[in-house]
């Protein structure tokens, strides 16, 4: 009997120390994640981007144009620098194809390459593939609720093959806009994605600066800026086909 | 017999020939062991040198110079940005026979919609000839032409996976040193068989300048491979080059550091060799002990008389030991004489091991050559001598001890 009391009081002390006892809002967690993810994408979207890659070995800037339909399909065209201009990427579901203009070859990104940085950045192919099932791949639970924001703990569901042990996802309450995503493995924080500079673009309020910081290797940060956006525009289905890889690259 | 000087050597030598047949047989057995041991020992030395020579000639060289940390992850970023001063350091090392700058990297190769991982090895074909046998791996078509940066030579299995043959184009994509994607097309001019299993389905060779362009390397390279005149000078050359370079910027590795698995293989081979020798040695030593024991028991009465005349048991034991030592020395002299001639002949005319069907497992180590040569050296002689002499004389310890404990009266009554 005594030990039960001890455990209970320790548990209470611990949860108090963390900030607040975990509030189980049930399916609410899923709703929050889903809604916040949808906000940034829209049903269809056509955007232009600037990407800055910083690491100890080099620093470079690229620009890109993207089209997406739901979370399922997306298409990216590299528009600068000249060396890589015309390279394209197509994502449909879990598959990514890449077209390299210089050698006029297209190929599928192999499963072994999924965790490699895309275009030498801190964003991986896996990040791109995961975004359409983000809300479904994790069990979300609100762990902190204060200062007009939720912090959700996202634990990977079984069978998803996700290598992170959990994610912390911070969302602003009023707007449902994401503030950060922190990626953890057994050894702790690996990487952090920060959303900032909320602006109105294409008729929506969205964060226009996304910065992915590598927390294990110092000095590695990739920042992308949304430079223009249109939402819910009508997009031709032909955009999201393999034959468009080569066509769009010209 | 106090005060009397016993002519041990004379007595022992005469005793040895009192039973001629037994001594000759024992000497023959020990001589055979000595012969085989020396011969096998020299084959082991020759074989290991052959392994090493073959292995370093494939890829590792005797000494390698990289930018610090390259050996760990082969990152394209870790490169020797300005190789000229490094070349001067290498050239000034005393025992350096040849060196060749290279670029090694992993890449994605694609053709006709097929793609495969590739290991790019880029070098100056004329320089590379002096340090490795890569040019000998060519099986079809042509080797790289110096100055033709659009040419590649592929391993057979890689070409097959990509569905290309000689004359076809293949696309290569890599992450370049400036973070951009390096991509270009090349024409397959030849097909090769690298002869080392890990490279059979990945190797792609090209000119050094082609890889420098592809990786945005400028004048940089990421490996300089060095050959010395004699394997014994590897460590000296390694430290000589190391002294000339900034340790915060470069790493200098010997073949043993770059390919520890080969050193382990050699160590393992020695261990199994020594184990075999021990087993045979113990059997041979038991045979010798039997002979010596017999010669002692035959002479118990004789020893009794000698003791009655005043000779001490300990002096008798010394005599028994000496007989054995003499016999062993004679046997070793005969055995080693034959062994030396034998090994010397085999150092010129090798032994073809292909009959033992070891070809396949040796091929994994790049040893297509199955003819083995012996190598004569002082160390092999000393080790063999110590082993045989030690085994054979220790076999006489028990009979000598028995002799030392004999009581004169019992010995005289013995029949």
Image: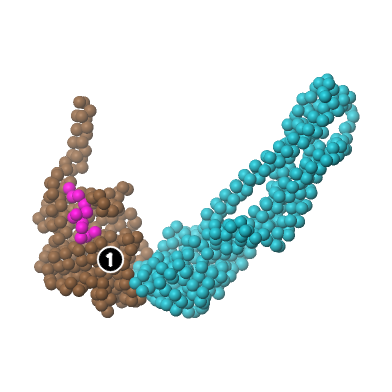
Q: Residue B201: horizontal and vertical position, in percent?
A: 45, 65
Chain B's colour is cyan
Quadrant location of the N terminus of chain A in the rendered image = top left
Between B100 and A31, the one nearer to me in the picture: A31
The quarter of the displayed image where residue B300 is located: top right
Q: Residue B287: horizontal and vertical position, in percent?
A: 73, 38
Q: Is residue A147 visible?
A: no
Main SS of the magenta part reads helix
Q: Residue at x 16, y 73 (%)?
A: A236
Between B2 and B407, the one nearer to me in the picture: B407
Between B50 and A38, the one nearer to me in the picture: B50
- The answer to whether B336 is drawn above or below residue A90 in the figure is above
Residue marked by disc 1: A96
Q: Residue at x 9, y 55 (%)?
A: A174
Chain A's colour is brown
Is residue B143 on the magenta stretch?
no
**Quick check: A17 left or right of B257?**
left
């Amino acid at each position: 009997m005594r030990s039960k009391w001890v455990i209970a009081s320790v548990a209470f002390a611990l949860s108090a120390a963390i900030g607040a006892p975990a509030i189980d809002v049930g399916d609410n967690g899923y709703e929050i994640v889903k809604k916040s993810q949808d906000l940034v994408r829209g049903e269809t979207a056509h955007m232009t981007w600037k990407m800055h890659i910083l690491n100890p070995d080099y620093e470079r800037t690229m620009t890109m144009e993207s089209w997406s339909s739901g979370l399922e399909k997306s298409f990216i065209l590299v528009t600068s620098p000249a060396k890589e201009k015309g390279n394209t990427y197509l994502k449909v579901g879990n598959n990514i194809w890449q077209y390299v203009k210089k050698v006029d070859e297209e190929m599928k990104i192999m499963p072994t390459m999924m965790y490699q940085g895309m275009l030498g950045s801190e964003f991986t192919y896996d990040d791109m593939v995961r975004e359409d099932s983000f809300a479904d791949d994790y069990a979300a639970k609100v762990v902190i609720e204060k200062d007009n924001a939720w912090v959700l703990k996202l634990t990977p569901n079984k069978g998803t093959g996700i290598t992170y042990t959990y994610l912390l996802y911070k969302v602003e309450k009023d707007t449902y806009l994401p503030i950060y995503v922190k990626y953890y493995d057994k050894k702790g924080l690996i990487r952090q994605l920060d959303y900032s500079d909320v602006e109105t673009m294409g008729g929506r309020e969205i964060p226009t600066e996304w910065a992915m910081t590598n927390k294990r290797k110092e000095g590695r940060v990739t920042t992308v800026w949304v430079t223009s956006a249109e939402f819910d525009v009508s997009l031709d289905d032909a955009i999201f086909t393999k034959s468009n890889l080569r066509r769009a690259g010209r | 017999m106090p005060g009397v000087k016993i002519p041990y050597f004379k007595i022992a030598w005469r005793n040895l020939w009192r039973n001629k047949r037994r001594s000759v047989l024992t000497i023959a057995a020990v001589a055979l062991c000595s012969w085989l041991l020396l011969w096998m020992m020299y084959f082991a030395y020759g074989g290991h040198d052959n392994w090493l020579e073959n292995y370093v000639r494939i890829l590792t060289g005797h000494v390698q110079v990289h930018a610090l940390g390259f050996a760990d992850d082969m990152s394209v970023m870790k490169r020797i940005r300005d190789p000229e001063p490094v070349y001067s350091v290498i050239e000034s090392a005393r025992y350096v026979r040849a060196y060749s700058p290279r670029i090694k990297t992993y890449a994605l190769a694609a053709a006709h919609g097929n793609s495969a991982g590739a290991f790019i090895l880029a070098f100056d074909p004329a320089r590379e000839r002096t340090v490795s046998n890569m040019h000998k791996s060519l099986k079809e078509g042509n080797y790289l032409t110096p100055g033709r940066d659009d040419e590649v030579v592929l391993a057979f299995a890689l070409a097959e996976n990509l569905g290309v043959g000689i004359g076809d184009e293949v696309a290569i994509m890599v992450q370049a040193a400036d973070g951009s994607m390096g991509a270009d097309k090349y024409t397959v001019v030849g097909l090769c068989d690298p002869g080392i299993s890990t490279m059979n389905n990945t190797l792609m060779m090209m000119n050094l300048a082609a890889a420098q362009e592809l990786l945005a390397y400028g004048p940089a390279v990421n490996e300089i491979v060095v050959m010395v005149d004699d394997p014994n000078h590897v460590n000296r050359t390694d430290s000589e080059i190391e002294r000339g370079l900034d340790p915060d910027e470069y790493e200098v590795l010997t073949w043993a550091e770059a390919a520890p698995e080969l050193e382990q293989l050699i160590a393992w081979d020695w261990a199994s060799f020594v184990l075999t020798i021990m087993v045979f040695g113990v059997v041979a030593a038991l045979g010798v002990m039997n002979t010596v024991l017999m010669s002692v028991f035959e002479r118990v009465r004789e020893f009794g008389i000698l003791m009655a005349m005043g000779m001490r048991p300990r002096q008798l034991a010394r005599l028994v030991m000496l007989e054995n030592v003499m016999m062993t020395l004679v046997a070793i002299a005969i055995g080693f004489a034959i062994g030396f001639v034998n090994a010397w002949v085999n150092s010129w005319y090798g032994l073809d091991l292909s009959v033992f069907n070891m070809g396949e497992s040796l091929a994994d180590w790049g040893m297509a050559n199955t003819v083995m040569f012996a190598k004569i050296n002082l160390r092999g002689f000393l080790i063999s001598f110590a082993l045989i002499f030690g085994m054979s004389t220790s076999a006489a310890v028990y009979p000598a001890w028995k002799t030392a404990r004999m009581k004169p009266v019992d010995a005289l009554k013995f029949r």
